[in-house]
Structures are given as C-alpha cells and as structure tokens.
Image (cartoon, helix red, strand yellow):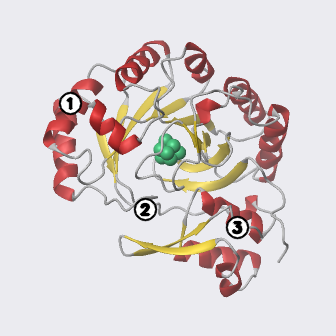
C-alpha cells in the first residue's frame, strides 16, 4: 500500500447522492473550513470557522482536474457535477469562475450532467456569492431553524452571522436565480423538531422562492452525539410545510446507489472519499472486489474507522491520519 494518497485533490466520485442521483463531487475548501459547525456534520467539528471568502486553491488546477475526471468517467451515468465537499463551497471566491468552466468542460463531452451547488446559505446575503451561483442549474441551500437561538444551537455559526440576514439573502437569491432551488431542512431530535419551530420554519420558507423542500435526517454518522428526528416529527414537518404550500419530500434513508469505482485509479484514492462520504459495508466489499484488494487490508488502512449508526456499519476516513 502506497504511503501517499495519489491522484485527485478536488474531485471525488461519482458517489450516490440521496437527492442528486449519481454525483461527481468537487471540493472547493480545505478540510472543515466552514462558516458553521453543525451538530450533525459528518465531517467532525469545524477546524477553521470563517466567513472570509478566499481563493483557496489554484483555480486552473481545479478545472483541469474536473476535465480529467470527466474524460475518465466518459460514458458513466453522472447526473450532477456538485460543488460541496469538505466545507462551505461559497467561501471559495473562485466558485463562479470554476462553475462556468465546469459547464464548458461538461459540454465538450457526451455527458448530460448538470451543475449543482450545496450551500449552507450563510453567505447568500452577499451579492458576489449570489452572482457566483447564477450559472448553475440547481442550488441546494439549507435552512435548519427560523429562531436565532435554535439556529445557534444546531448550526453553531460564525459569530458575525445572524439568521435574519441569512433569510434576507435566501429571499434575494430566490428572486434573482433562475435555476432550481431545492431547500434542505435537516431535522435533529430535540433541536429543531418541535411543532413551534417547524411552524416558524414553514412560515419563513413560504416567503421564499423554493421549488422543492427536502426534509433530511442524519443518516450517516454525525460529528456530535445527536439523533435523527423520529417518524412522528418528520410526518408533522411534512404536514406543516405542505400546509404552508411548499412541495416537500422526505429523504430519510441511506444512499442505495452505487459508487462508480472506475473514476478512481487506486484503492487509496477511493478510500479518500470516505472522509466526505462514508461507505457502508456492502460498498466497501464492492471496492475490495473492484481493485482486487483484500477487504481486511482496506479496513486496516490508517485513518479508516468503523462506526455504527442507526443499526448500520459505516466506514469513514479521517484525513489527519497519514497513509
Ligand atoms: S454540515 Fe455543512 S454547513 Fe454544517 S458544518 Fe458541516 S460542512 Fe459546514
């Protein structure tokens, strides 16, 4: 087993996504560089909490890697090229430029992939951030609370952020943006699943231009010891949100799609995506078969950790451990 992870630095996947089908992810921030430190974050506590936008990586290098991976997966089903990853993608000040280049790269292949951004919404009050998102096909902003105190408990935001400003940003974004807005609400037991908070979220959402609302619960091992909202709270949320006129779906199941391991040149490269995208036992078995590497050897890679969550075994990779 090589001591260093080779190959891809920014692009991972395609990975199965609960909302986007087969998604090729692009990471635009250093690990855990985020404006929030959500209690449910599967990446662990935020190590760099910031609201400062920066050019974190050489943007040409990111685009070249996107082009290289698109070539490598030519012919595979990729539904979305998704900017998400190891932190908040809108913190990257090159996002708009990279998203436009990514679209041109897709157009030069036979792929029909769309471009999406998953954002925590925290910076949508900034005009430059909204402008950076204008060219993408779909945007998945999140809103987990409509009360300042609950927002602080669930999302543990940077001290300069205030919920009112974020709601204003979401409203402005909805007015200006022409793509699809799929709002996400992550329901965490005992945090934001009370009827009172759900009513407040519904009232806030009814003021926004939202095409779909996805109710999520933590289905992969989260950073803190939190539990997903129970079925009763989820059903109540659907009733309350639909009552406010918002088309709502519940995404409360682990991904059942397939990882496409053809995109990876080595088992080490594939293992790296488990830092952002834990694999279930069956997915790890398929990885072992694909590369002909013994399952026990993969489990023994330093940094690969087994975690049980909601009765299922998951494997994650902690990047702090060196290969
Ligand atoms: S879940 Fe997303 S927004 Fe929340 S801390 Fe993790 S990376 Fe940041």
- Element class at badge 3: loop
Q: Position of residue 121 (x, y in %)?
A: 46, 30
Q: Residue at x 65, y 54 (%)?
A: 14
Is the distance from the Cβ of mark 3 to the nearest ligand 1 atom less than 8 Å? no
Q: Position of residue 59 (x, y in %)?
A: 80, 32
Q: Say which label, 3 or 1, has the lower sequence index.
A: 1
Pointer 1: what residue?
200
Residue 201 occupies which quadrant of the picture? top left
**Distance from the alpha carbon under mark 2 to that under mark 1:** 28 Å
Decide if residue 27 is in sight here: yes
Q: Residues within 10 Å of mark 1 (few under 14, many from 20)?
A: some
Label 2 with label 3: CB-CB less than 8 Å: no
Label 3 with label 1: CB-CB less than 8 Å: no
Assign the N terminus to one quadrant of the image.
bottom right
Pointer 2: what residue?
254
Q: Residue at x 58, y 34 (%)?
A: 50
- Residue 274 got which mark? none
Q: Say which label, 2 or 1, has the lower sequence index.
A: 1
Q: Residue at x 52, y 35 (%)?
A: 35
Image height check: is 22 above or below 49?
A: below
**Distance from the alpha carbon under mark 2 to that under mark 3:** 26 Å
Is the distance from the Cβ of mark 1 to the nearest ligand 1 atom less than 8 Å? no
Decide if residue 214 is in sight here: no
- Residue 321 got which mark? 3
Q: Say which label, 2 or 3, has the lower sequence index.
A: 2
Depth-wise, is mark 3 or mark 1 nearer the camera? 3
- Camera-side residue: 287 or 222? 222
Q: Residues within 10 Å of mark 2 (few under 14, many from 20)?
A: some
- Element class at badge 2: loop
- Element class at badge 1: helix
Q: Position of residue 178 (x, y in %)?
A: 50, 18
Depth-wise, is mark 2 or mark 3 nearer the camera? 3
């Amino acid at each position: 087993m090589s001591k260093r992870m080779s190959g891809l630095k920014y692009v991972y996947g395609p990975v199965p996504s609960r909302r986007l089908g087969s998604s090729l992810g692009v990471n635009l921030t250093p690990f855990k560089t985020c404006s929030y430190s959500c209690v449910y974050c599967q990446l662990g506590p935020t190590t760099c909490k910031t609201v400062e936008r920066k050019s974190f990586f050489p943007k040409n290098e990111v685009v070249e890697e996107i082009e290289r991976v698109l070539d490598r997966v030519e012919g595979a089903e990729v539904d979305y090229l998704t900017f998400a990853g190891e932190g908040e993608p809108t913190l990257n000040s090159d996002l708009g430029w990279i998203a436009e280049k990514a679209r041109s790269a897709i157009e030069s292949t036979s792929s029909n992939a769309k471009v999406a951004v998953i954002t925590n919404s925290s910076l949508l009050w900034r005009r430059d951030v909204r402008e950076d998102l204008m060219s993408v096909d779909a945007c998945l902003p999140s809103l987990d609370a409509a009360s300042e105190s609950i927002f602080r408990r669930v999302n543990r935001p940077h001290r300069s952020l205030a919920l009112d400003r974020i709601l204003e940003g979401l409203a402005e974004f909805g007015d200006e943006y022409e793509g699809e807005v799929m709002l996400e609400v992550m329901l965490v037991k005992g945090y934001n699943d009370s009827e009172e908070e759900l009513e407040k979220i519904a009232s806030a959402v009814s003021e926004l231009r939202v095409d779909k609302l996805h109710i999520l619960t933590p289905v992969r091992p989260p950073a803190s010891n939190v539990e997903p909202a129970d079925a009763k709270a989820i059903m109540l949320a659907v009733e309350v949100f639909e009552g406010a006129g918002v088309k709502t779906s519940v995404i409360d199941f682990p991904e059942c799609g397939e990882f496409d391991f053809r995109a990876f040149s080595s088992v080490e490269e594939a293992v790296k995506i488990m830092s952002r995208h834990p694999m279930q036992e069956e997915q790890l078995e398929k990885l072992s078969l694909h590369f002909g590497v013994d399952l026990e050897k993969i489990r023994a890679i330093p940094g690969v950790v087994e975690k049980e969550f909601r009765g299922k075994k998951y494997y994650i990779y902690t990047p702090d451990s060196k290969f």
